Amino acid sequence: MSVETAAVAERPADRPPLLEQYRLMTLIRRFEDRATELFKQGVIFGTAHSCVGQEAIAAGAAGVMRDTDYLVGHHRSHGHLIAAGADLRKMMAEMFGKRTGYCRGLGGSMHIADLSLDILGCNGIVGAGIPHACGAALTAKLRGTGQAAVAFFGDGAAGQGAVHEGMNLAATWALPVVFICENNQFALSADWRAQRAVEDLADRASGYGMAGEIVDGNDLLAVEDAVADALAQAREGHGPTFLELKTFRRMQHSMRANLPDVRDPRLVEEWEAKDPLPRLARLLRDRGELDDDRVEAVLREVEHDVELAIELALADEDASAEELLPAVLGPQRRYPAPAAETERKLGFVAAVREALELELEADPSVILIGEDIGKVGGLFRATEGLYERYGAERIRDTPLTESGFVGCGIGAALTGLRPVVELQFSDFAGVAFDQIMNQAAKLRFMMGGAPSIPLVIRMVSGGGVRLGAQHSQSLEALFAHIPGLVVAMPSTPYDAKGLLSAAIRGDNPVIFLEQKLLFFGEPAPVPAERYGIELGVGRVAREGTDVTVVALGALVPHALRAARELEAEGVSVEVVDPRTLVPLDIALIAGSVAKTHRLVVAHEAVQFCGFGAEIAAHVAQHCFWDLDAPVVRVGAAAHPIPYQKDLEVATLPGPAEIVAAVQSLFLSG
Ligand SMILES: Cc1ncc(C[n+]2csc(CCOP(=O)(O)OP(=O)(O)O)c2C)c(N)n1
């Protein structure tokens, strides 16, 4: 009896019959071969990646996963999707750019997801899905559902920061995740042998403090056993496992196949002989479960399934432009105004804290994630006391791993939690930027506008406290430039509480900017009750008739001071606070300009390419005939924030700059 035949004898009865696994692997191969042909014919475009040669991994993992386990794929995931039960027609339709595709033609091959099957998506950014799997596993753990997350990635991805961060986070929090590294030996042209100093990638597992195992990825039975064991460990609370599945990519890197294949032909030949499909066929023949007729019959069946999917998908309607904008952000919710005026006063940070507390109280799916937010209560004390009240599970202190925990928040948001992630300074967004820009902002769109991503990323922003160039930036324009992010920038304690509450209750990723200078402002009235302010609705902070000053965040109090000074000169200033930059209440701004005929836009951020340019351009184009003078911008000079006190003060615009800007309008008018 061969080793494999012996393994079959011990194979648990609850696994899919081997013949079914053979059929599944044949189906995946047929799908990939036909997709490759269709790519060459120009029916599929862009890029797509064949998993031929790696089918045993997809079938083996799916064979032992529960239907409810979360699956996170990568760019080479057609096999994982098919094995998890994805609809072939919708997959083909997606690759054809049809509106019946999984992502309505907005995502393409690399972004197919099916949340109804707990397939959380694939990824065009190598390694980026790993933290999402951690977030899904966190949801499962906190809810005690017994689900686990399985994340696939390649040997190339194993070098990515997001992978390291995700693995460390998963091990630290003992999350139920199985990390499946499909070591197909090449990352595009990069031979894995030249990409690491460890003997095997799974050696890294011990460095994270998790179990690691090297598995023959072309042996279906070995894959099933390894993944089943890892899933059992995960479900029993023993945390994640790193499985390195040795395999080989039989085809070129992508279906486009436009690059030279640098792989040694002898290696290609060697692994051709180890192809998992004939290998399983041999085993089945040895056991008398497969013969030529059955092979033919299976081929005919899968050909029929794939051809039918292609035929139906080809007849479907193309993706339509009407789908585009609604897919970017979910609708904003409206909230009733607080019942009564109040005399009670809070500072800015206390108002933020109160919003967090009320949302934690109202909704058990709200959790907070960030560095030093627990016992310390956050660097600026916005989470003070929440750890004591809501405990370590919901107020989650993290390792220093911004990319890891922002990505974890995304995965948690995709699976039903409402995470509020704190970045201590908006400057640190740089190390989490892929998760913000390519993941949080784009997942809804790339998945066809379907999923909600209720994720709030709070960031302390701006200068004024001598923290230097890397802790003082105002980066709102950067975020506002990325479709798919709501950007909130409150200027009062009242707005901070109401906007944050709305951000947490809403269905979109929100960048919530808390400007440091506002922390030192006078306490102001804030109702004690839970209330929300619709994101996208600005306010007139002060009425006036001669000039409109649109001010952002910390510049609102400066603009109000400037307005008081200018009043003494007989100039009546209207101060408009947009409160959110995305969505932007442009109607409020345009209405004010129609009344005052003059506009100054002021923000703390660098003026060059700042958000003020967007407002100025809009008004210049759409309100031109209302203007009696050019639009003037106030912002910081184009250099990083300096440390030295006088230099920092001189860099940040204040009331004097706004006064001067307003005066210049009347001189030129
Ligand atoms: C962050 C990032 N870097 C580079 C690329 C370009 N790229 C796409 S796939 C790929 C190779 C990935 O190799 P691996 O993770 O081993 O997966 P495989 O393609 O072998 O399945 C590269 C370099 C990318 N998409 N994302």
Image (tube, rainbow, N blue to C red):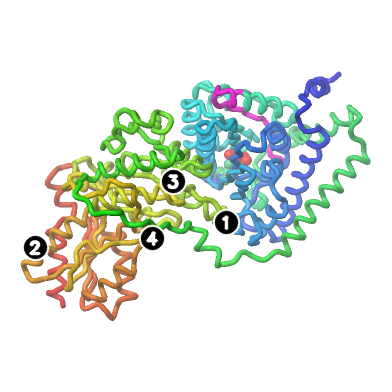
- Nearer to us in this view, 529 or 448: 529
Q: Earlier in the sequence, mark 4 or mark 3?
A: 3
Q: Are marks 3 and 1 in contact (CB under 8 Å)?
A: no
Disc 3 from disc 1: Cα separation: 18 Å
Dot 2: element: helix
Label 4 neighbour load within 10 Å: few <14, some 14-19, many 20+:
some
- Residue at image point 83% right, 35% down: 19
Label 3 neighbour load within 10 Å: few <14, some 14-19, many 20+:
many
Q: How many marks?
A: 4
- Nearer to us in this view, 116 or 74: 116
Quarter of the figure with the N terminus: top right
In the rendered structure, the answer to whether residue 111 lies left or right of residue 8 reads left
Dot 3: element: loop
The residue that label 1 is drawn on is 448
Residue behind label 3 places its C-beta within 8 angstroms of ligand 1: no
Give the quadrant of residue 28.
top right
> Label 3 sits on what residue type?
Leu
Q: In the rendered view, would you say 379 is above or below 450?
A: above
In the rendered structure, the answer to whether residue 497 lies left or right of residue 307 reads left
Q: Earlier in the sequence, mark 2 or mark 1?
A: 1
The residue that label 3 is drawn on is 455
Q: Position of residue 643 (x, y in %)?
A: 18, 42
Q: Earlier in the sequence, mark 3 or mark 1?
A: 1
The residue that label 2 is drawn on is 565
